Image (cartoon, helix red, strand yellow):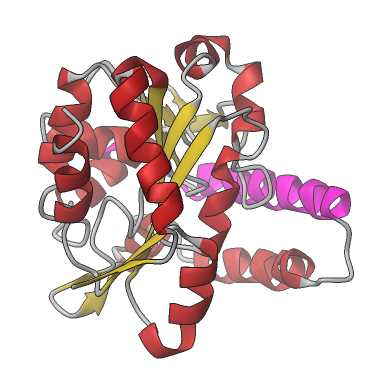
């Protein structure tokens, strides 16, 4: 694994701010898939939660065809540079709502999600558990952002690893369940590819109150889009760390331009742990 520090000045600023203002000035924003987890397991790219459900035959036979039709309808809108952000947001809201409705109609159940959690296709990076324990011990809020279609799995995964600590908040897509464990409706707000940012938090006071006065931010992601997680927050110091899991030669220059630090090679969380430990 290679560590590329592209913004040394910002790294030093972050260190100085934390050492002078303490841990009470910090909160952490993190993507989940391929950020806290490995991008590949046993040489195979980590599939999405939806892919695991589909490939495991947990949903009805016509699910894949209908989901693909939604993709064909909405994905071109998502990537069209000529369409305004406001239009894209409306379209993405429609897409996620339609897909959630499809999952419900396709028989999604909690037992399906439990099987995803216990599969060997999702795996924390080495060092992530130590990172989570450190954040817990220092009472640093960690907000997990994910636009995954079945975000319930994320908290269930943390619970299965005995790391579902009180300082962790999950800003993910969740379902309401009936007494038999079947999904019956979506929990609002729905998080999609165009609203995965901290502007959502003002509508969730119990999370916003935890971080509103913590103006120093550590952001962890594996895609350029993850940098948008901090949008809408009035931070004083932001340090961004990007996991470049694949396509090194094609993506290295862009990642170095956008992230302060790039961790190349789908490795562990050792650099992050060392950085924080040195600030104790």
Q: Residue furthest bottom?
A: 249
Does the magenta segment cover residue 109? yes
Q: Position of residue 183 (x, y in %)?
A: 46, 33
Examine the residues drawn in magenta and state their main secondary structure.
helix
Residue shown at 49%/80% (left/top)? 253
Image position, residue 82 (x, y; %): 89, 70
Identified at 29% across, 26% down, the residue is 19
User: Would you say residue 30 is visible in this rendering?
Assistant: no
Q: Is residue 178 visible?
A: yes
Question: Which of the 4 image quarters holds residue 200?
Answer: top right
Residue located at (26% from left, 39% from top): 111
Residue shown at 39%/39% (left/top)?
A: 14
The residue stretch that appears in magenta: 85-111
How far across and down, in percent of the image, does residue 80 sit?
Answer: 80, 72
Instruction: Count up the numbered dots.
Output: 0
Which quadrant of the figure has residue 21?
A: top left
In the figure, 29 relative to 62: above or below? above
Position of residue 74 relative to residue 2, above or below, is above
Say which of 108 and 135 sits in front.
135
């Amino acid at each position: 694994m290679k560590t590329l520090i592209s913004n040394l000045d910002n790294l030093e600023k972050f260190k100085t701010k934390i050492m002078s203002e303490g841990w009470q000035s910090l909160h952490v924003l993190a993507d989940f898939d391929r950020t806290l987890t490995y991008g590949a397991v046993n040489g195979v790219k980590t599939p999405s939660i939806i892919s695991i459900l589909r490939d495991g035959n947990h949903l009805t036979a016509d699910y894949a065809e209908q989901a693909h039709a939604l993709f064909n309808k909405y994905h071109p809108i998502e990537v069209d540079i000529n369409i305004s952000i406001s239009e894209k947001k409306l379209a993405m809201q429609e897409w996620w709502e339609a897909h959630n409705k499809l999952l419900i109609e396709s028989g999604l159940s909690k037992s399906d999600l439990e099987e995803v959690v216990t599969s060997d296709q999702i795996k924390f990076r080495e060092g992530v558990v130590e990172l989570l324990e450190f954040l817990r011990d220092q009472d640093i809020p960690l907000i997990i952002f994910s636009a995954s279609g079945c975000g319930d799995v994320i908290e269930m995964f943390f619970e299965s690893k005995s790391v579902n600590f009180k300082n962790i908040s999950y800003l993910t897509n969740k379902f309401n369940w009936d007494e038999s464990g079947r999904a019956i409706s979506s929990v609002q707000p729905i998080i999609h590819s165009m609203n995965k940012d901290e502007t959502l938090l003002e509508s969730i006071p119990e999370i916003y109150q935890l971080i509103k006065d913590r103006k120093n931010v550590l952001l962890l992601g594996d895609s350029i889009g993850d940098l948008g997680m901090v949008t809408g927050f009035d931070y004083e110091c932001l340090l961004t760390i990007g996991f470049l899991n694949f396509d090194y030669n094609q993506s290295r220059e862009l990642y170095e331009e956008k992230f302060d630090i790039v961790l190349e090679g789908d490795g562990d969380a050792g650099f992050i742990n060392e950085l924080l430990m040195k600030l104790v």
